[in-house]
Image (spheres, grey):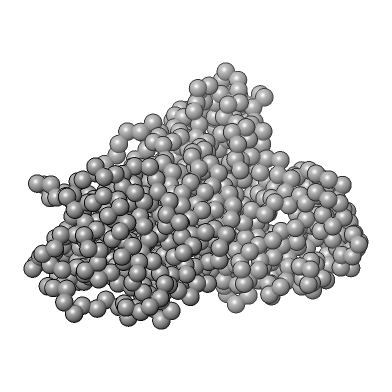
Amino acid sequence: MLTTTKDKSSLLLVAFLVALSSLQLHCHAAYPYYGTKIGALTRLHHGVSGDVYAVDSRTIFIKKFNYDGEAPAAYFYVGNTARPSNEGAARLRDEKGGTAALTRRYRNKDITLSLPEGKTLRDVKWFSVWCDEFAVNFGDVAIPNSLDFPRPQKISALRGVHGVSSDNIVIVDAQTLLVPNFSYDGEAPDAKFWVGRGQRPTSDGLRIPDENGKENPLRRYDRKTIVLTLPEDLTIFDIGHFGVWCEAFTVDFGHVRLPEGLNVPPSLKMLGISPQSKLNCEVLYDDLAFEVRWAVAGESIVVQLVAKLDPNNYMSFGISPNKNISQMIGADVAVAWVDPETGNGFAQDYYLEGKAQCSGGRGACPDVKILPNTNSIRLLNAAMVNGYSIVTYQRSLAATDSLDLPISVTDAESAVWAIGPLNDYREVSFHTYYNKHLHHIEFGRQPKWNCPLPEGAKSGINSAEQEDEVTQIPHSFAGGAGYPPAGRPLNVEPDEEFYENRAQALHRTTPVHAPQKQQVTALSTQHRSVPTPKPVNSKDAWDIPAIQCHEPEDGVFYAQMGPTGGKHGYPAITGHVGWGISWYINGLLIPELHVVRGRTYTFVVEGGNNPDIPAKYHPFYISDDPVGGYEHKREEEKKAVRIFAGVHRSRSGQVTPTGVGRLCNWTPDVEGPPADDYQSFGAYQRTLTLKCDAGEPGVISWKPDKNTPDTVYYHCFTHRYLGWKIHVHDSCNGISGGDGIGAASDRYEIREPAPIREDYTAESSIRHETKMASALLKLSRRAY
């Protein structure tokens, strides 16, 4: 997790994770945000010019850099003297990481430069193109002491329903979010990571890919730290919130607001940088596409291992105790693998005391089997992508206990690696493949990508430099396919059709002034089709008795919330998946109601009254629409819906829900078995307890008439698929509402609602509490 006291190392760590989770092609973002502008280079000699930006605390970006390349010994310098000079100044490597003089020509070239390790923009007063041989300043820009350079910003934590939670989210850069310790129970059918304009989610927002680049419904997360990348040209300056949204049911599971004017770095993509140029990569064993990728992050190192492993196999990588020999005995290694069935990843700290399996603390053992509390490996992420196992972990550069070896960033280290099967204890059994020769790695070198690029990828270089750079990055791979990008599948097609082109969901606006002089891209107001949940097999549905047209005698229904009842409940009854809650009418799970034209019915509504908590706000309404969720429908869809009760229409045509009251929930026993284990609703119903918030219920009245269709539906105004059918009849004679009517059984009961105040008489049909209880008790004698 990032902290404000470790901005430098945290930024490097997060930038590494971002690059690993989304190795993308060289591409310019559509909006010219490059960070905080420092100023323009003075035009002194050799055509030097360009605009200089602070990307972060130790990175400079020069837009349209020009230099004629004719001087014999020109270099990039920074210093803290009053005027540019090479006395006491620090020479920068060029944009390729080279140390040679600048002898080639630059023409309107965008370049990114890093300050030397240990220095930040706080430590320097100027940046210059300086000629050593003649001690001449070719062009410079002053760096003010008050420069507010971009840096990652910490915002609020996620909190919501379905177990959604996290630690404080970090906005890493203009297109990257780090969500530490994210949790979600995975039980909703269509939850997505979601962004949009405004302060809270709506169906007008956009889904964003998960940490693996997928847009599938989210699986279960248990305190997992993830990195998310905004797609295409979308930036955090375009959005007002981020959260988890159930798309099919238009439910907010939890969100955070993004403050305006965040001073964060631009993303690598916005700078036109291929992320590969910021990472190191070496091939360890080409036959199995075994790679090690890494970046030094302050006092630690982040490592990613990638290999095409057989099931139940591990991959290991570490440091030899002898810098001149790749020696297994005494080595300090990480052993990693991904379970192909669960997708869970593992990374364990091992000490190789011997070549045998671990027994009694001898052999190839996890550190914790030798000494307690000695695991120095922190698993960051893991995935199985197109058959490749990908595991990312972090460890300290220093030795943190007697079983660890330090990793040098100044000298080459002798590396050791192996691949082989795990035993029944999920520990190293033996190694099938291993390095038989010395394998030196310079962990502290300038970033260099010595691995194949993803299939179809290009190196992201300008045509003028293509020839000499292509030779630095090998493209060969067995079968002609490249290694997979870390954390992102190859050739992944969208799972649903309504994002035919994500750019259709964006539109340009005119530039506006912002603290960092950004231009803003707004999310489109164009509505997209909302996905329809897949049909559900209804053969195992509980038998929920319909409420007949003569019941209750006074025509009063209590509408409250409750659980969907597992596989036997809402999904089996309706043929649609539910997202966790449903309407309960007079204590029954979505019963079919039978009503008669010309009679007035009253619904006492207790579905929640706080629109600021959408997951607990369920206005009740009746319409001819079998889906519900009127608020989030497209305008053309709304025009096709007739609403009969539960809303108010203003003269301007605006529709406002009126079926709003305190929240009452039928709550199951947390210690009891799951709903799926109950063979009847009656048995399940007796485990439910009604819990109500403070406040008053809402009341709506409805009198069906000759213009009311034979079948209408009660639903939630803000969410889809919470209710069920109402059958409308001309008379009550000869109507039967279900097979269970008249059977002698006590398998269910109409449950007594929470008391309401006698003086709450917004509708004349509300009676005294005792009369309500009496009417309900009469219904409870019906069999089920």
Q: Residue furthest top?
A: 82
- Left or right: residue 210 versus residue 516 is right
- Left or right: residue 543 versus residue 77 is left
Compare residues 8 and 657 and report the one nearer the observer: 657
Compare residues 499 and 717 and report the one nearer the observer: 717
From what the image shows, is residue 367 above or below residue 238? Answer: below
x and y, in percent, of residue 712 in the image: 21, 68
Compare residues 742 and 465 and report the one nearer the observer: 742
* Image point (80%, 44%), residue name: 400
In this view of the protein, can residue 775 be seen by the observer? yes
Q: Quadrant of residue 560?
A: bottom left
* Image point (58%, 26%), residue name: 122
- Left or right: residue 140 versus residue 583 is right
- Left or right: residue 684 versus residue 729 is right
From what the image shows, is residue 316 above or below residue 131? Answer: below
x and y, in percent, of residue 608 in the image: 34, 49
x and y, in percent, of residue 383 in the image: 60, 63
In this view of the protein, can residue 110 be seen by the observer? no
* Image point (21%, 69%), residue name: 549
* Image point (38%, 75%), residue name: 784
